[in-house]
Amino acid sequence: MKTDQYTHPDYYGLDELYSDEHKLVRDAARAWVKKEVSPIIDDSYEKAVFPKHLIPGLGEIGAFGPYIPEEYGGPGLDQISYGIIMQELERCDSGLRSTASVQSSLVMYPIWKYGSEEHKQKFLPKLATGEMVGCFGLTEPDFGSNPGGMITNFKEDGDDVILNGAKMWISNSPFADVAVVWAKNEEGRIHGLLVERGMEGFSTPEMHGKLSLRASSTGELIFDNVRVPKSNILPGRSGLGAPLSCLDSARYGIAWGALGAAMDCYDQALRYSQERIQFDVPIGSFQLIQKKLAEMITEITKAQLLTFRLGQLRNEGKATTAQISMAKRNNVEIALNIAREARQIHGGMGITSEYSMMRHMANLESVITYEGTHDIHLLITGMDVTGIPAFARDMT
């Protein structure tokens, strides 16, 4: 069994800006990952199974809803702590971070922000510990970058609504206890509904054949005349802006998480460059290898400063959707580039499971697509700086 030797790079002394609480959160998450996840993640990835036995541990380190107030069972941490936890998880595997990110930002966040007090008391404490697992239903087979075009809908029927439609590419869906589903009412207005496991007509078939995020569970949500109590509709907000605000929280976590993958690849490449001998010297003594490593640490350092400042803005309630999009897009891109360069430094060994670069690389191909594609995030920044939208989007 290989040893997890990870040491995080900190070229600009970012640790000096972290509070003692931030460091405690990070150290606890890192220790848990090294002990519980690193030894089994390659096997889980190769077998394409999510290690469900890790769910209680994720709850114990505060990975589920870190910012959820203690009154609802959450740790009550700040946004930087949330980012740090996501970074430590994705440093190991993007699929692991995806599971925690969905639970936190796409399930617990909308219940906390838009749910009734009854919803919060019923679901949040159990979601925080992992006793319950949730998923988020927005993307449909024909509507990804244009979620407002969704056809999933519901009609009123007494004290209930009748839900029909389908969602696709849904993390956690095969074993989720509750799904936060976004659907249109008879007037075409988008609302969030809490659809619970066991409701007649509700099924969650698992998707197979993935070559990315293999250590996470992905499936569909199928609604065939599902009767949902009206009391399960989130009352706090309707319209497309509601699910998009959840995606802001998720994308923020991704910005930190993808950076973790980049840091892991750099750490391994640096160590390998000092240990691998060719032509009687370590390969780290060659100019081209040093060029690769210097560019890696430069991009990592820029991304660290970007995410830390974004975390401060999130804590202050000032971070904009466009700022979050910039960080998500930048950090996933640099992570992919660094994974590829690190693989080259490792030569042929880089394609084996002895090192994590190829696994990170494959995973990041999903991360660069979900929660807003790479190009869509570029257009969000473009619209923000020019004031001119390059695509149609209803933000109401």
Image (cartoon, rainbow, N blue to C red):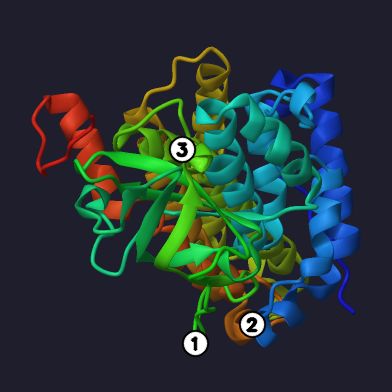
Q: Residue at x 79, y 38 (%)?
A: 26
**Can you say which quadrant of the picture contains the N terminus?**
bottom right
Q: Earlier in the sequence, mark 1 or mark 3?
A: 1
Q: What residue did someone put label 2 on?
A: 48
User: Which residue is the site of mark 3?
Assistant: 246
In this view, the mark in front (3 or 2): 3
Q: Are marks 2 and 1 in contact (CB under 8 Å)?
A: no
Check disc 3 and give the amino acid type.
Answer: Cys
First in residue order: circle 3 vs circle 2? 2
Q: Is residue 11 visible?
A: no
Q: Position of residue 288 (x, y in %)?
A: 50, 64
Disc 1 target residue: 209
Q: Residue 312 is drawn in which quadrant? A: top right
Residue sticking out furthest to the front? 158
Secondary structure beneath dot 2 equals loop
Neighbour tally class for label 1: few under 14, some 14-19, many 20 plus, Cα within 10 Å? few
Seen at 73% across and 78% down, the residue is: 44
Q: Is residue 168 left or right of residue 151?
A: right
Viewer-proximal residue among 235 and 26: 235
x 25%, y 35%: residue: 381
Question: Who comes first in sequence, dot 2 or dot 1?
Answer: 2
Quarter containing the C terminus: top left
Residue 105 image-quadrant placement:
top right
Residue 206 x %, y %: 54, 78
Q: Secondary structure at mark 3?
A: helix
State the separation of the CA atoms marked 2 and 1. 9 Å
Q: Amino acid at mark 1?
A: Gly
Give the image location of residue 181, x and y in percent: 44, 51
- Residue at mark 3 to residue at mark 2: CA–CA distance: 27 Å
Task: Tell me the amino acid under the disc marked 2.
Answer: Ala
Residue 356, position as x, y percentages in the image: 66, 71
Element type where label 1 sits in the image = loop
